Structures are given as structure tokens and as C-alpha cells.
Image (tube, grey):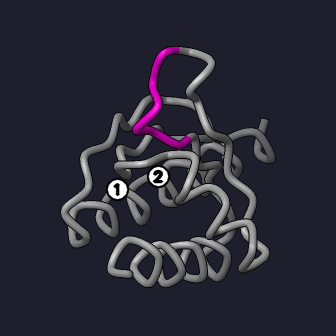
Amino acid sequence: HEFVEKCRRENSAGRAMLGDGFKKLGLGFEPGGGNFLLVRVGDGAAVFTALQARGIITRPVRPYGLPEWLRITVGTPAQNERLLAALAAVIRV
């Protein structure tokens, strides 16, 4: 039970960290309650490709009728920081 609660706390903190980062970047997102968030990035396919070129894997959700969105999994604080920095660079290009 302790491990599960620790994972829940870390996941919640990671979702909050990403959500704050998305807000600072001016991106809309759906917070959800799982270990990922949906974020509206504009051209989801292009942002997916640009992030992948930087070694960051996300999931485009065009097949679900959401071509402007990506599914982003909550990572460690360091991984989340890396994702946010890369996302900022990609969407400002």
C-alpha cells in the first residue's frame, strides 16, 4: 500500500508540474487522472516529429480525431523539465 500511495503522489506531482509548464507555454491541456495528459500543440504530427528528433517520445492522437493534440506521459521531474524545455523550443520555431 505504501508503494502505491508513493506512486500516486509522484504521478500527481508530475501532472501538476506538466500542467503548470503547459500553462506557461500558453497551451491548452486536459489534466485527467492517469499518468498522462493531453496537450493541444497545434500541428500534433509536426510537434511529435520535432520532439522525437530530440529524443522525446510522445503519442500523437490524430487517430482519435485530435490532430492538434499529443498524449504526454508523466515522467520524473528531470524528464518533465526536459520535455517542457524541448516543447518550448519546438513550438516557438
Looking at the rendering, in which quadrant would you find the N terminus?
top right
Closer to the camera in the image, 3 or 21: 21
Q: Give me the residue at 67% from left, 42% from top.
A: 59
Quick one: SS at disc 1? helix
Q: Give me the residue at 53% from left, 43% from top.
A: 70
Q: Main secondary structure of the magenta part?
A: strand
Mark 1 = which residue? 19
Residue 68 drawn in magenta: yes
Q: Position of residue 78 (x, y in %)?
A: 64, 82
Q: Give me the residue at 32% from left, 42% from top.
A: 29
Q: Residues within 10 Å of mark 1 (few under 14, many from 20)?
A: many
Q: Residues within 10 Å of mark 2 (few under 14, many from 20)?
A: many
Mark 2 = which residue? 15
Please report contact status of discs 1 and 2: CB closer than 8 Å, yes or no.
yes
Going by the numbered disc 1, the residue's amino acid type is Gly
Going by the numbered disc 2, the residue's amino acid type is Arg
Closer to the camera in the image, 86 or 13: 86
